[in-house]
Image: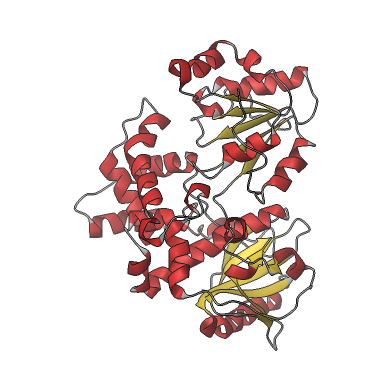
Amino acid sequence: MDKVANKSKYKKRIVDSLVKRYLKIFGAICIEGPKWCGKTWTSSYHANSEFLVGDPRGNFSNRLFAEMEPYTVLEGKTPRLIDEWQEVPSLWDATRSYLDKSPEKGQIILTGSSTPPKKGILHSGTGRIKSIRMNTMSLYESGDSSGDISLKDLCEQKFQSKILNEVSLEKLAYLIARGGWPGNIDVEESECCELSNGYMENVIKTDLRKLDKDVDYNEQKAKLILKSLARNESTTVSNQSILNDIIENDAESISKNTLVKYLNAFNRMFLFNNQEPFSSNIRSSLRVKQMEKRHFSDPAMACAMLKLTPKKMMNDLNTMGFMFEGLVERDLFIYAQSMGGELFHYQDYKGNEIDAVIELEDGNWCAFEIKLGLSKAEEGAKNLIKVCDDIVRNGGKAPLIKCVIYGVGNMAYQNSEGIYIVPITALKD
């Protein structure tokens, strides 16, 4: 069977470096993420043989064969791709057992666009299978960021001020609504919302039913919850606030237990990429007591639930600001991941906030404020100075860098206070 990925046509992804690294360390890796983000192509690019569990040919004979002969499915030239393993959950334990008997590194690449209720009926896969989260494309991966400014270089204090091509507000609205799905990159503005609209419709009408065949999910409840989350994109809204939001905006109520059930289901489909709270003090209660900042995996998902087109976004800049923040934090997650870092947000008990924080492997951290336009960048810089100074006064560690990331403008510079001011359309990992 021909391979899924044509190496000559493969568009490089930032996650490629992690795939190569972990194949040298673990017996198997599992690339997880939302549907259509490119997991199969990336996995196929790195694989030397492959088995597609969800292949519909022969009345889904591959799935039946995997259920009957999981060990045989795993055998082949390594690394061997097993695509959409979750359709036959026993493949997880079969992989773990297979690796115990043949402990070489880099044998199996699993991919999954959802997880079964229990990943690993007998064993978690710890020490054998390394999970890698994959997202939709960042602006740099899709060719919509020039990549003139490297996040890694910023962390190493390597920077030169530059005059750049300005991105219009209209183009920014298009990039948010279009999303980062590889199959949607070149679509025209008039059609840029069609994929995300269809995506979320499939989630509600089809994917939920496939996720748990013994659970009766209600389409209307799923839609109400997702709409509320879209209205609260890039905020630390609580579950109770989501319930109140639904009651206020729709003539239907949902219980707390029902909400949790649906949120867990959406999480298992990788629809969210929330930011956990950060503190420079590892043992601080801020890491436990403060709430996550809510994000869809791609801001286009939120736009789809709100029927928010680029033109509508242009008429509501407040909403566009939240969606833009979601886009920036999607990209920061991808860039941080390539450096071994993690993305957080900061909020203390006094109301001080930092939009995004990247914590690096060595414990250093970077502070980011996000603004829609360059005209607000210095305002963001002042907030970073204020909050970071307060953290240091209270015994915390100062950030490695402070940076304002903005949308509309044409300059990348370091201001008199040492704050980097950088457009998202010039940033890369």
Q: Residue furthest top?
A: 68
Q: Residue furthest front?
A: 8
Q: Is residue 170 visible?
A: yes
Quarter of the figure with residue 317 = bottom left
Q: Residue at x 62, y 55 (%)?
A: 334
Give x and y (percent) for residue 244. Answer: 30, 57
Q: Nearer the viewer, residue 345 or 1?
A: 1
Q: Residue at x 48, y 39 (%)?
A: 268
Give x and y (percent) for residue 264. Answer: 44, 41
Quarter of the figure with residue 187 = bottom left
Horizontal placement of 397 versus 93: left or right? right
Quarter of the figure with residue 401 = bottom right
Colour basis: secondary structure
Q: Residue at x 80, y 68 (%)?
A: 156
Horizontal placement of 247 versus 368: left or right? left
The C terminus, quarter of image: bottom right
Number of marks present in the image shown: 0
Measured along the vertical axis of the image, is residue 275 above or below residue 99?
Answer: below
Measured along the vertical axis of the image, is residue 202 above or below residue 3?
Answer: below
The N terminus, quarter of image: top right
Q: Residue at x 76, y 17 (%)?
A: 101
Q: Nearer the viewer, residue 112 or 215?
A: 112
Q: Is residue 277 visible?
A: no
Horizontal placement of 297 versus 191: left or right? right
Measured along the vertical axis of the image, is residue 351 above or below residue 65?
Answer: below
Q: Residue furthest bottom?
A: 416
Measured along the vertical axis of the image, is residue 2 above or below residue 138?
Answer: above
Give x and y (percent) for residue 312. Answer: 32, 68
Give x and y (percent) for residue 270. Answer: 50, 43
